[in-house]
Amino acid sequence: MDLRIPYDVIPPNYHVCDPAYGSGLLPADCFAAAEGLPQGSETTTYLLNSPEADTFTIPNMIHSGACYISIEAAGPSLPSTLRIAPNDLRAMAGLVLQRCVLGAGIGGFGTVGINGLIEYILDPSTDYNNPSYRPDTCFVTVAVTGLPGRLFSPGNTDPAVPLGLAWYNTKIADMAPLRSATSLHRSANAAYWIIKAAGMQRGSPVSWNRQVSESSDKMTYDCDPGLGSPLAVDCAQVEWQKLGQASETIIVGPEKVVFLHSNTCYLAVTASVALVLTWEQIRTALSTLMAICIQHPFHAPQGGRARFRSQPRQICSHRRKRMDPITGLNALPPHANITVFEQTEPWSNPVDELNTCTWKSISAGLSISKCTTA
Protein backbone atom coordinates (compact mmCIF):
# COMPACT_ATOMS: atom_id res chain seq x y z
CA MET A 1 0.00 0.00 0.00
CA ASP A 2 1.22 3.49 -0.84
CA LEU A 3 1.68 5.25 2.51
CA ARG A 4 1.07 8.86 1.61
CA ILE A 5 0.40 9.85 5.23
CA PRO A 6 3.64 10.76 7.07
CA TYR A 7 3.97 9.42 10.57
CA ASP A 8 7.07 10.99 12.08
CA VAL A 9 5.88 11.86 15.58
CA ILE A 10 8.00 13.77 18.10
CA PRO A 11 7.99 12.56 21.73
CA PRO A 12 6.56 12.99 24.31
CA ASN A 13 3.51 12.25 22.14
CA TYR A 14 2.68 8.56 21.92
CA HIS A 15 0.07 6.10 20.66
CA VAL A 16 -1.82 3.03 21.92
CA CYS A 17 -3.49 0.23 19.93
CA ASP A 18 -6.45 -1.68 21.36
CA PRO A 19 -9.47 -3.61 20.02
CA ALA A 20 -11.64 -1.34 22.18
CA TYR A 21 -11.21 1.14 19.32
CA GLY A 22 -12.38 -1.35 16.74
CA SER A 23 -11.15 -4.51 15.03
CA GLY A 24 -11.17 -5.70 11.44
CA LEU A 25 -10.63 -2.16 10.18
CA LEU A 26 -9.97 -1.94 6.44
CA PRO A 27 -6.68 -0.10 5.76
CA ALA A 28 -8.00 1.29 2.47
CA ASP A 29 -10.93 2.96 4.27
CA CYS A 30 -8.72 4.34 7.04
CA PHE A 31 -6.12 5.77 4.67
CA ALA A 32 -8.86 7.33 2.55
CA ALA A 33 -10.25 8.98 5.70
CA ALA A 34 -6.79 10.23 6.70
CA GLU A 35 -6.28 11.79 3.29
CA GLY A 36 -9.25 14.03 4.12
CA LEU A 37 -7.39 15.64 7.03
CA PRO A 38 -6.22 19.20 6.30
CA GLN A 39 -2.55 19.73 5.49
CA GLY A 40 -0.10 22.44 6.47
CA SER A 41 3.13 22.86 8.42
CA GLU A 42 2.23 26.28 9.85
CA THR A 43 0.39 26.46 13.17
CA THR A 44 -3.30 27.15 12.72
CA THR A 45 -5.98 28.29 15.14
CA TYR A 46 -8.50 25.55 15.93
CA LEU A 47 -11.77 26.47 17.66
CA LEU A 48 -12.77 24.21 20.56
CA ASN A 49 -16.41 23.17 20.98
CA SER A 50 -17.58 25.79 18.51
CA PRO A 51 -21.23 25.57 17.35
CA GLU A 52 -20.03 26.53 13.86
CA ALA A 53 -18.17 23.38 12.88
CA ASP A 54 -15.73 23.58 10.00
CA THR A 55 -12.35 22.15 9.01
CA PHE A 56 -10.50 23.80 11.86
CA THR A 57 -12.76 22.98 14.81
CA ILE A 58 -12.30 20.40 17.56
CA PRO A 59 -13.93 17.96 18.10
CA ASN A 60 -14.04 16.80 14.52
CA MET A 61 -14.65 13.48 12.82
CA ILE A 62 -14.13 12.30 9.27
CA HIS A 63 -14.70 8.85 7.84
CA SER A 64 -14.48 6.66 4.82
CA GLY A 65 -16.49 3.46 4.75
CA ALA A 66 -16.49 1.98 8.25
CA CYS A 67 -13.30 3.73 9.42
CA TYR A 68 -13.56 6.94 11.45
CA ILE A 69 -10.86 9.39 12.50
CA SER A 70 -11.86 11.42 15.54
CA ILE A 71 -9.97 14.50 16.76
CA GLU A 72 -10.78 15.60 20.32
CA ALA A 73 -9.39 17.89 23.00
CA ALA A 74 -8.62 16.52 26.45
CA GLY A 75 -7.76 17.83 29.87
CA PRO A 76 -9.49 19.32 32.93
CA SER A 77 -9.18 22.92 31.69
CA LEU A 78 -9.94 23.61 28.02
CA PRO A 79 -9.21 26.93 26.31
CA SER A 80 -11.44 28.32 23.58
CA THR A 81 -8.77 27.89 20.90
CA LEU A 82 -5.66 25.81 20.24
CA ARG A 83 -2.71 26.47 17.95
CA ILE A 84 -1.76 23.30 16.08
CA ALA A 85 -0.04 22.55 12.79
CA PRO A 86 -2.46 20.42 10.71
CA ASN A 87 0.44 18.17 9.70
CA ASP A 88 0.93 17.22 13.37
CA LEU A 89 -2.58 15.74 13.39
CA ARG A 90 -1.95 13.99 10.06
CA ALA A 91 1.31 12.58 11.41
CA MET A 92 -0.37 11.06 14.45
CA ALA A 93 -3.16 9.64 12.28
CA GLY A 94 -0.48 8.13 10.06
CA LEU A 95 1.30 6.57 13.04
CA VAL A 96 -1.88 4.98 14.38
CA LEU A 97 -2.74 3.70 10.89
CA GLN A 98 0.72 2.20 10.44
CA ARG A 99 1.12 0.65 13.87
CA CYS A 100 -2.47 -0.28 14.76
CA VAL A 101 -4.51 -0.75 11.58
CA LEU A 102 -1.80 -2.18 9.32
CA GLY A 103 0.23 -3.68 12.14
CA ALA A 104 -2.55 -5.41 14.08
CA GLY A 105 -5.87 -4.84 12.29
CA ILE A 106 -7.25 -2.83 15.22
CA GLY A 107 -7.90 0.79 16.11
CA GLY A 108 -6.11 3.09 18.51
CA PHE A 109 -5.31 6.65 19.38
CA GLY A 110 -2.36 9.01 19.78
CA THR A 111 -1.65 12.28 21.55
CA VAL A 112 -0.67 15.67 20.11
CA GLY A 113 0.68 18.48 22.28
CA ILE A 114 0.74 16.58 25.58
CA ASN A 115 4.04 18.20 26.63
CA GLY A 116 2.21 20.99 28.52
CA LEU A 117 0.47 18.47 30.78
CA ILE A 118 3.70 16.54 31.36
CA GLU A 119 5.58 19.71 32.29
CA TYR A 120 2.84 20.63 34.78
CA ILE A 121 2.71 17.26 36.55
CA LEU A 122 6.54 17.17 36.77
CA ASP A 123 6.76 20.69 38.20
CA PRO A 124 7.92 20.31 41.84
CA SER A 125 5.48 23.04 42.87
CA THR A 126 2.42 21.13 41.61
CA ASP A 127 0.18 20.08 44.48
CA TYR A 128 -1.17 16.61 43.65
CA ASN A 129 -3.67 16.88 46.52
CA ASN A 130 -5.23 19.99 45.01
CA PRO A 131 -4.12 20.30 41.37
CA SER A 132 -4.99 23.44 39.44
CA TYR A 133 -4.72 22.58 35.76
CA ARG A 134 -4.03 25.51 33.46
CA PRO A 135 -5.43 25.77 29.91
CA ASP A 136 -1.95 25.06 28.53
CA THR A 137 -2.21 21.51 29.94
CA CYS A 138 -4.88 20.77 27.31
CA PHE A 139 -3.85 18.36 24.55
CA VAL A 140 -5.42 16.68 21.54
CA THR A 141 -6.02 13.04 20.64
CA VAL A 142 -6.35 11.50 17.20
CA ALA A 143 -8.29 8.23 17.30
CA VAL A 144 -8.78 5.76 14.46
CA THR A 145 -11.83 3.67 15.23
CA GLY A 146 -14.62 1.59 13.81
CA LEU A 147 -16.92 2.48 16.72
CA PRO A 148 -18.05 6.09 16.23
CA GLY A 149 -20.09 7.52 19.07
CA ARG A 150 -19.49 4.50 21.33
CA LEU A 151 -16.28 5.66 22.97
CA PHE A 152 -15.53 8.51 25.32
CA SER A 153 -12.67 10.92 24.69
CA PRO A 154 -9.53 8.75 24.94
CA GLY A 155 -7.42 11.63 26.21
CA ASN A 156 -9.64 11.82 29.28
CA THR A 157 -10.65 8.17 29.78
CA ASP A 158 -7.89 5.89 28.47
CA PRO A 159 -5.59 4.51 31.20
CA ALA A 160 -2.59 5.00 28.91
CA VAL A 161 -2.64 8.73 29.78
CA PRO A 162 -2.07 8.40 33.56
CA LEU A 163 0.34 5.52 32.91
CA GLY A 164 2.39 7.84 30.71
CA LEU A 165 2.40 10.46 33.48
CA ALA A 166 3.50 7.78 35.96
CA TRP A 167 6.34 6.75 33.64
CA TYR A 168 7.81 10.25 33.53
CA ASN A 169 7.84 10.43 37.33
CA THR A 170 9.44 6.97 37.53
CA LYS A 171 12.11 8.02 35.05
CA ILE A 172 13.13 10.93 37.31
CA ALA A 173 13.00 8.70 40.39
CA ASP A 174 15.31 6.16 38.74
CA MET A 175 17.89 8.84 37.95
CA ALA A 176 17.91 10.20 41.52
CA PRO A 177 20.03 8.70 44.33
CA LEU A 178 18.36 5.71 45.96
CA ARG A 179 16.05 6.67 48.86
CA SER A 180 16.72 10.35 48.28
CA ALA A 181 13.93 12.88 48.78
CA THR A 182 13.59 13.22 45.00
CA SER A 183 13.42 9.46 44.46
CA LEU A 184 10.80 8.96 47.18
CA HIS A 185 8.72 11.94 46.04
CA ARG A 186 8.71 10.91 42.38
CA SER A 187 7.96 7.28 43.24
CA ALA A 188 4.96 8.44 45.29
CA ASN A 189 3.79 10.57 42.35
CA ALA A 190 4.13 7.60 40.00
CA ALA A 191 2.03 5.48 42.37
CA TYR A 192 -0.58 8.26 42.39
CA TRP A 193 -1.00 7.99 38.60
CA ILE A 194 -0.92 4.19 38.53
CA ILE A 195 -3.78 4.11 41.06
CA LYS A 196 -5.76 6.41 38.78
CA ALA A 197 -5.04 4.17 35.78
CA ALA A 198 -6.09 1.05 37.68
CA GLY A 199 -9.50 2.57 38.32
CA MET A 200 -10.12 3.17 34.61
CA GLN A 201 -11.34 0.95 31.79
CA ARG A 202 -11.24 1.67 28.07
CA GLY A 203 -14.72 2.54 26.86
CA SER A 204 -15.95 3.81 30.24
CA PRO A 205 -16.53 7.48 31.16
CA VAL A 206 -14.18 7.42 34.17
CA SER A 207 -11.59 10.19 33.80
CA TRP A 208 -8.03 10.34 35.12
CA ASN A 209 -8.87 13.75 36.58
CA ARG A 210 -11.20 12.33 39.23
CA GLN A 211 -10.00 12.10 42.82
CA VAL A 212 -9.11 8.58 43.97
CA SER A 213 -8.44 7.72 47.59
CA GLU A 214 -5.38 5.57 48.23
CA SER A 215 -7.54 3.50 50.58
CA SER A 216 -9.60 2.35 47.58
CA ASP A 217 -6.54 0.69 46.04
CA LYS A 218 -6.61 -2.95 47.09
CA MET A 219 -4.67 -4.53 44.21
CA THR A 220 -1.04 -5.03 43.23
CA TYR A 221 0.05 -5.19 39.58
CA ASP A 222 3.62 -6.37 39.01
CA CYS A 223 5.35 -6.40 35.62
CA ASP A 224 8.06 -9.06 35.31
CA PRO A 225 10.40 -9.49 32.31
CA GLY A 226 10.99 -13.02 33.57
CA LEU A 227 7.47 -13.83 32.32
CA GLY A 228 8.45 -13.06 28.74
CA SER A 229 6.98 -10.62 26.24
CA PRO A 230 3.48 -11.71 25.20
CA LEU A 231 2.18 -9.71 22.25
CA ALA A 232 -0.52 -7.17 23.00
CA VAL A 233 -2.61 -8.30 20.03
CA ASP A 234 -2.58 -11.89 21.35
CA CYS A 235 -3.51 -10.85 24.89
CA ALA A 236 -6.33 -8.75 23.46
CA GLN A 237 -7.64 -11.89 21.80
CA VAL A 238 -7.68 -13.60 25.20
CA GLU A 239 -9.52 -10.65 26.74
CA TRP A 240 -12.11 -10.28 24.00
CA GLN A 241 -12.63 -13.84 22.75
CA LYS A 242 -11.59 -16.37 25.41
CA LEU A 243 -13.36 -15.14 28.54
CA GLY A 244 -16.94 -15.99 29.43
CA GLN A 245 -19.90 -13.70 30.02
CA ALA A 246 -19.50 -11.18 32.85
CA SER A 247 -21.81 -12.88 35.37
CA GLU A 248 -20.66 -16.44 34.64
CA THR A 249 -18.37 -18.02 37.21
CA ILE A 250 -15.42 -20.38 37.42
CA ILE A 251 -13.90 -22.27 40.33
CA VAL A 252 -10.17 -22.04 41.03
CA GLY A 253 -8.05 -23.33 43.87
CA PRO A 254 -4.76 -24.99 44.83
CA GLU A 255 -5.53 -27.98 42.59
CA LYS A 256 -7.53 -26.10 39.94
CA VAL A 257 -5.73 -23.64 37.66
CA VAL A 258 -7.59 -22.18 34.68
CA PHE A 259 -5.44 -21.52 31.60
CA LEU A 260 -6.50 -19.53 28.54
CA HIS A 261 -4.31 -18.56 25.61
CA SER A 262 -3.99 -17.07 22.16
CA ASN A 263 -0.71 -17.60 20.31
CA THR A 264 2.06 -16.04 22.45
CA CYS A 265 -0.17 -14.88 25.32
CA TYR A 266 -1.18 -17.16 28.21
CA LEU A 267 -3.43 -16.31 31.13
CA ALA A 268 -3.41 -18.39 34.31
CA VAL A 269 -6.07 -17.86 36.99
CA THR A 270 -5.04 -19.28 40.35
CA ALA A 271 -5.99 -19.14 44.03
CA SER A 272 -4.42 -20.38 47.24
CA VAL A 273 -7.85 -21.51 48.53
CA ALA A 274 -10.95 -22.65 46.68
CA LEU A 275 -12.73 -19.60 45.23
CA VAL A 276 -15.56 -18.77 42.87
CA LEU A 277 -14.70 -15.89 40.53
CA THR A 278 -16.79 -14.15 37.90
CA TRP A 279 -15.44 -13.50 34.44
CA GLU A 280 -16.08 -9.80 35.07
CA GLN A 281 -13.56 -9.86 37.92
CA ILE A 282 -11.01 -11.68 35.76
CA ARG A 283 -11.58 -9.45 32.73
CA THR A 284 -11.20 -6.28 34.82
CA ALA A 285 -7.95 -7.46 36.42
CA LEU A 286 -6.64 -8.66 33.05
CA SER A 287 -7.50 -5.41 31.30
CA THR A 288 -5.73 -3.38 33.99
CA LEU A 289 -2.69 -5.67 33.99
CA MET A 290 -2.48 -5.41 30.19
CA ALA A 291 -2.62 -1.62 30.30
CA ILE A 292 0.18 -1.45 32.88
CA CYS A 293 2.52 -4.19 31.62
CA ILE A 294 1.72 -5.15 28.02
CA GLN A 295 0.20 -2.09 26.34
CA HIS A 296 2.22 0.50 28.23
CA PRO A 297 2.89 3.51 25.99
CA PHE A 298 6.61 3.69 26.79
CA HIS A 299 8.08 0.28 27.56
CA ALA A 300 8.17 -3.03 25.71
CA PRO A 301 5.54 -5.66 26.60
CA GLN A 302 6.22 -7.68 29.73
CA GLY A 303 4.30 -10.43 31.44
CA GLY A 304 2.84 -9.65 34.83
CA ARG A 305 0.80 -10.63 37.85
CA ALA A 306 -2.30 -9.18 39.47
CA ARG A 307 -3.30 -9.97 43.04
CA PHE A 308 -5.13 -8.65 46.06
CA ARG A 309 -2.74 -6.72 48.30
CA SER A 310 -2.48 -8.60 51.57
CA GLN A 311 -3.12 -6.48 54.66
CA PRO A 312 -4.14 -9.03 57.31
CA ARG A 313 -4.95 -6.58 60.10
CA GLN A 314 -7.44 -4.74 57.87
CA ILE A 315 -8.77 -7.65 55.86
CA CYS A 316 -12.42 -7.00 56.71
CA SER A 317 -12.29 -3.41 55.53
CA HIS A 318 -10.80 -4.55 52.24
CA ARG A 319 -13.63 -6.82 51.21
CA ARG A 320 -15.54 -5.38 48.30
CA LYS A 321 -19.12 -4.56 49.14
CA ARG A 322 -21.65 -6.36 46.99
CA MET A 323 -22.82 -3.19 45.23
CA ASP A 324 -19.39 -1.59 44.74
CA PRO A 325 -18.47 -1.35 41.04
CA ILE A 326 -15.66 -3.64 39.95
CA THR A 327 -12.57 -1.73 38.82
CA GLY A 328 -8.88 -2.46 38.57
CA LEU A 329 -8.58 -1.20 42.14
CA ASN A 330 -10.67 -4.00 43.66
CA ALA A 331 -11.01 -6.61 40.90
CA LEU A 332 -9.85 -9.72 42.76
CA PRO A 333 -10.66 -11.01 46.26
CA PRO A 334 -8.02 -12.17 48.75
CA HIS A 335 -6.12 -15.32 47.72
CA ALA A 336 -6.86 -14.90 43.97
CA ASN A 337 -4.17 -14.20 41.37
CA ILE A 338 -3.87 -13.89 37.61
CA THR A 339 -0.62 -14.28 35.70
CA VAL A 340 -0.05 -13.29 32.08
CA PHE A 341 3.02 -14.79 30.43
CA GLU A 342 4.59 -15.69 27.12
CA GLN A 343 4.53 -19.34 26.14
CA THR A 344 7.67 -20.15 24.16
CA GLU A 345 7.69 -23.94 24.40
CA PRO A 346 6.47 -25.90 21.39
CA TRP A 347 3.99 -28.58 22.31
CA SER A 348 1.32 -30.79 20.86
CA ASN A 349 -2.32 -30.90 21.88
CA PRO A 350 -3.75 -31.86 24.27
CA VAL A 351 -1.23 -30.33 26.65
CA ASP A 352 -0.84 -30.52 30.39
CA GLU A 353 0.05 -26.92 31.19
CA LEU A 354 0.76 -27.66 34.86
CA ASN A 355 3.68 -29.90 33.94
CA THR A 356 5.35 -27.61 31.41
CA CYS A 357 8.74 -26.08 32.11
CA THR A 358 7.14 -22.66 31.72
CA TRP A 359 4.50 -23.08 34.42
CA LYS A 360 6.83 -24.91 36.80
CA SER A 361 9.30 -22.01 36.48
CA ILE A 362 6.55 -19.42 37.06
CA SER A 363 5.27 -21.31 40.11
CA ALA A 364 8.80 -21.35 41.53
CA GLY A 365 9.30 -17.62 40.87
CA LEU A 366 11.93 -18.26 38.19
CA SER A 367 12.41 -16.77 34.73
CA ILE A 368 10.86 -18.69 31.85
CA SER A 369 13.85 -17.96 29.59
CA LYS A 370 15.42 -21.38 30.23
CA CYS A 371 12.28 -23.07 28.90
CA THR A 372 12.68 -21.79 25.34
CA THR A 373 13.53 -24.59 22.95
CA ALA A 374 14.36 -24.60 19.28
Image (cartoon, rainbow, N blue to C red):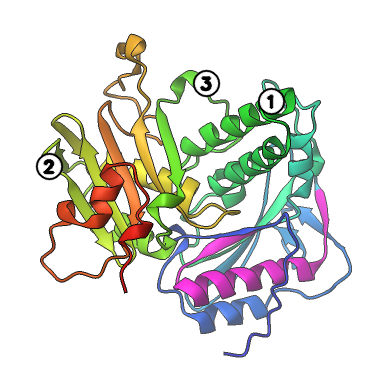
**Disc sitting over residue 213 in the figure:** 3
Q: Decide which of tag 3 and tag 1 comes sooner along the chain.
A: 1
* Extreme residue toward the right, this view: 42
Query: Which marked residue is nearer to the observer: mark 3 or mark 2?
Result: 2
As measured in the structure, the alpha-carbon distance from the residue carrying label 3 to the one carrying label 2 is 35 Å
Viewer can see residue 203: no
Q: Are marks 2 and 1 in contact (CB under 8 Å)?
A: no
Q: Secondary structure at mark 1?
A: helix
* Residue 5 in picture, x, y percent from top left: 68, 80
Residue nearest the observer in this picture, 258 or 18: 258
Q: Secondary structure at mark 3?
A: loop
Residue 256 is left or right of residue 346, and the answer is left
Residue nearest the observer in this picture, 321 or 282: 282
The kind of residue on which mark 1 rests is: His
Residue nearest the observer in this picture, 246 or 51: 246
**Disc sitting over residue 185 in the figure:** 1
Viewer can see residue 120: yes
- Up/down of 40 relative to 172, above or below: below
Q: Decide which of tag 2 and tag 1 comes sooner along the chain.
A: 1
* Residue 161 in picture, x, y percent from top left: 60, 46
The kind of residue on which mark 2 rests is: Lys
Q: Which residues are magenta?
A: 81-110
Q: Residues within 10 Å of mark 3 (few under 14, many from 20)?
A: few
Residue position for label 2: 256
* Residue 372 in picture, x, y percent from top left: 33, 65
Q: Decide which of tag 3 and tag 2 comes sooner along the chain.
A: 3
At a point 36% along the width and 41% down the height, the residue shown is 285
| SS majority, magenta | helix
As measured in the structure, the alpha-carbon distance from the residue carrying label 2 to the one carrying label 1 is 42 Å
Residue 145 is left or right of residue 264, and the answer is right
Q: Residues within 10 Å of mark 2 (few under 14, many from 20)?
A: some
